[in-house]
Amino acid sequence: MAEIIQKDGTWVFDGDALRLTPGRDKNVGLLRRELGELLVPLAALAGISFEQGKKSGRLRLRLRDGADPLLHATGGRLTEPHDPYQLLVEPDRYGVAEYFVDEVRNALLLDQVPSGPVDAYLLPGPSVPLSVSAGDGVANFDGERVRLEWKWQAEDAKSAAGPRTLPLADIVAVEWQPTVGLENGHLRFTVRAAPSKVPPKYDPNAVELWGFKRDPLMALVAAAVQARLPHPAARTAPEDAGPAEETPAPAPASAPAAEDDHDALLRRLRELGELHRSGVLTDEEFTLAKQAVLKRM
């Protein structure tokens, strides 16, 4: 098991999944705090990296395309304070972060996890019911229908029409867009047989966002709805496609490859010993790390 504990949060890897828990520090984004603990299966990962900086470093997870409804609904537009797949690391824990990266990468390699897109969500999305107030409206989602209610600041066209109820069966797409510069953001639902081309400010199927603190929480509504829509891969598959050709079984790993893996694990043990002797790893961290390596030999 590998673990790194920071003010920004705690990441734990047990060989099969990563458990991401947001910290209680005041700088942790509101979306991360509301989203809570995430369990990311190893099969959902495309990669992991660690970037060092003068004041702090950053661990980053890269998920496979189509694995997470939150990333799909937001189009990768979540900024650092709200991105649940980033962790700020203090300089005195850089060695632990590098070890954490090695452990995850070794597991991806040993389990031969592909980095390509997936055809089904591997994360469940935010739990429901959800209710978020931001911008010119309030978005409620109970798992079966979206209800949009308008604030007094909403345009007359929206207010006059009253609250809007959208059954999940009528929604074909959802999008969250943050405020960028002078351009307002939005949470927009594309409804079957009634697509709208008007700006979100006037669109009765959209909440306009103005760049305030609670705007990112609308991304939770977008993700919860996205998780219950057909997966994008299902919509793009050709309808007249014939039966898929049988994929040949992968060839067994050769003996030289197994020897290379064994040598890599031995090198890792030597590195851990050096980190322990230099004081980067504590006795407990070294023991846990060594046991994780020995299990794979």
Image (spheres, rainbow, N blue to C red):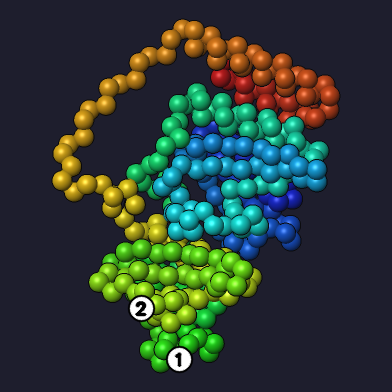
Q: Position of residue 63 (x, y in %)?
A: 50, 43
Location of mark 2 (residue)? 165
Classify residue 48 by image quadrant. Answer: top right
158 vs 133, left or right, is: left
Identify residue type, mark 2.
Thr
- Classify the position of the N terminus by image quarter: top right
Q: Amino acid at mark 1?
A: Asp
Tell me the quarter of the picture where residue 148 sits: bottom left
Closer to the chain start, of discs 2 and 1, is 1
Residue 27: x %, y % from top left: 72, 59
Q: Is residue 130 visible?
A: no
Q: Is residue 264 visible?
A: yes
**Residue positioned 69% across, 32% down in the render:** 98
- Where is residue 101? Give x, y as percent: 63, 33
Would residue 49 be found to the left or right of residue 131 on screen?
Answer: right
**191 relative to 254, above or below:** below
Image quadrant in which the C terminus is located: top right
Numbered circle sitting on residue 156? 1
Residue furthest right in the image: 278
Residue 4 position, x and y percent, is: 69, 39
Q: Is residue 131 above or below residue 264?
A: below
Spatial distance from mark 2 to mark 1, Cα to Cα? 18 Å
10 Å crowding of disc 2: few (<14), some (14-19), many (20+): some
Residue drawn at x 41%, y 89% as measured from the top left:
157
Q: Secondary structure at mark 1?
A: helix
Q: Is residue 38 found left or right of 65 in the rendered image?
A: right
Q: Residue furthest front?
A: 182
Q: Which numbered circle lies on residue 263?
A: none
How crowded is the residue under tag 1: few (<14 C-alpha within 10 Å), some, or many (20+)? few
